Amino acid sequence: MPTPEAHYRTIIGQQEERILPFLRTFEALQEQMHLAKLKEHKQALFDKVGDLFPPLNTELEGLTPPPALADFHQQWREAVAQLEDAYTSFLSASEFNPLVAYFQSRRAFTLGKFALYSLRAQLPTLQPYWVLPEVLPHLTDLETPVAGVETGTGVMHRPATDNHGEYSLYVPENYDPQKRWPLIITLHGGHGRGDDYLLTWLRPAKSKGYVVLSPKSLDRTWAIHQPGIDIRSILSIVEELLDEYAIDTGRLFATGLSDGGTFSYAIGLSCPKLFAGIAPIAGVLGPWAVPEESKKLPMFIVHGAKDFIFPVDMARAAYTLFSENGFENVTYKELPEWGHAYTYSINETLVLPWFESLPSRALA
């Protein structure tokens, strides 16, 4: 007969097996989201997930954890509650005014995922979710801290100061100050958050060894018409990180989604000598002055042919403008079936491989 702890862990393991498909399904939905197709998305999600959460909650209510796992049990219940909120909020969204429910759903999904990530050592069935498949055999190495390193690693959320806005940060758990680590600055979309968008980069960064900085805009979105406001904030954060971590200054990258894609143009073209490359996703090129030295800046423009916020013609025009004005390394990738949504697989399969293909800025 199994011990109480073994029985408890068996039940949690079975719940993990039911949660994992939900995480992947909801993530995929975020990447293919189109508010005009909300009814179809809701039905497709329900068809795949069904009545998942009430049975989980009933099971947890009747489950008594061993004393040593009481804290874990409470945290697991809170994570499940956040995921349930994400699911029910999305299903309750009105087709006529969906944004409030949609943003509530996305926020709950973010909080639920951060809760699960903090518990990952005790959730072996969910561990494949946090890394790319090819590095799963090396997960133990990725999770093993280097002896003597006291600098913070993992996911961190830091408050605003007089010099900069709040930001979220991911530093690989196996961070070693004896080597230099590349840094990706990743910029959220309009009305978004840095902690939320950080999650689109967590899996590839953990798998491939990148520090990720995901700052929050000082206002509700980036200061597109006065970019210096947010650029100063971001550069102040970078200066702090350079003092705290062993960052490879020849391998700094910037990318972002929607308004964040637009602002990755802004910061890249304003500070071209700082970056090894930028990758604007679903963004637009603003009317900024472009210094001559920015023509050497590698750029990877990604846009969906079905973008319903910034029509694809805007991205095509930007690429044409760069091509006709002497920019030396501009790549354009148009995604025929994508609209304007989140970027998990885009970051993993397109943007990160492009970043990795670039030479260090110091050697370029």
Image: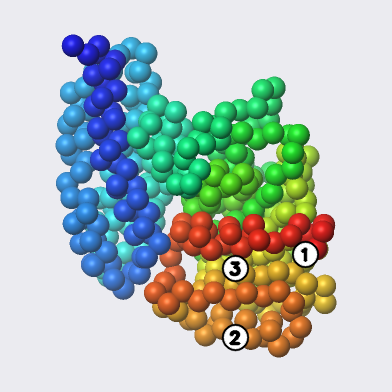
Q: Mark 2: which secondary structure?
A: helix
Reading the chain from its start, which is encountered first: label 1 or label 3?
1
Q: What residue is at 57 percent from the left and 28 percent from the top?
A: 144
Q: Which quarter of the figure has residue 356?
A: bottom right
The x and y percentages for residue 304 are: 46, 74
Reading the chain from its start, which is encountered first: label 3 or label 2?
3
Residue situated in front as seen by the camera: 330 or 60: 330
* Above-or-below relation of 168 to 285: above
What crowding class fits label 3: few (fewer than 14 Cα within 10 Å), some (14-19), or many (20 or more)? many
* Above-or-below relation of 155 to 227: above
* Above-or-below relation of 354 to 22: below
**Alpha-carbon span between mark 1 and mark 2:** 22 Å
Disc 1 to disc 3: CB gap under 8 Å: no
Q: Mark 1: which secondary structure?
A: loop
Q: Which quarter of the figure has residue 307?
A: bottom left
User: Which numbered dot is residue 280?
Assistant: 3
Q: Which residue is mark 1?
A: 271
The x and y percentages for residue 31 are: 40, 62
What crowding class fits label 2: few (fewer than 14 Cα within 10 Å), some (14-19), or many (20 or more)? few
Q: Amino acid at mark 1?
A: Cys
**Alpha-carbon span between mark 3 and mark 2:** 14 Å
The x and y percentages for residue 54 are: 18, 39
The reply, left or right, for residue 289 in relation to residue 128 is: right
Q: Amino acid at mark 2?
A: Ala
Q: Is residue 223 visible?
A: no
Q: Amino acid at mark 3?
A: Pro
Reading the chain from its start, which is encountered first: label 1 or label 2?
1
Q: What residue is at 17 percent from the left and 37 percent from the top?
A: 55
Q: Which quarter of the figure has residue 129?
A: top left
The reply, left or right, for residue 179 in relation to residue 307 is: right
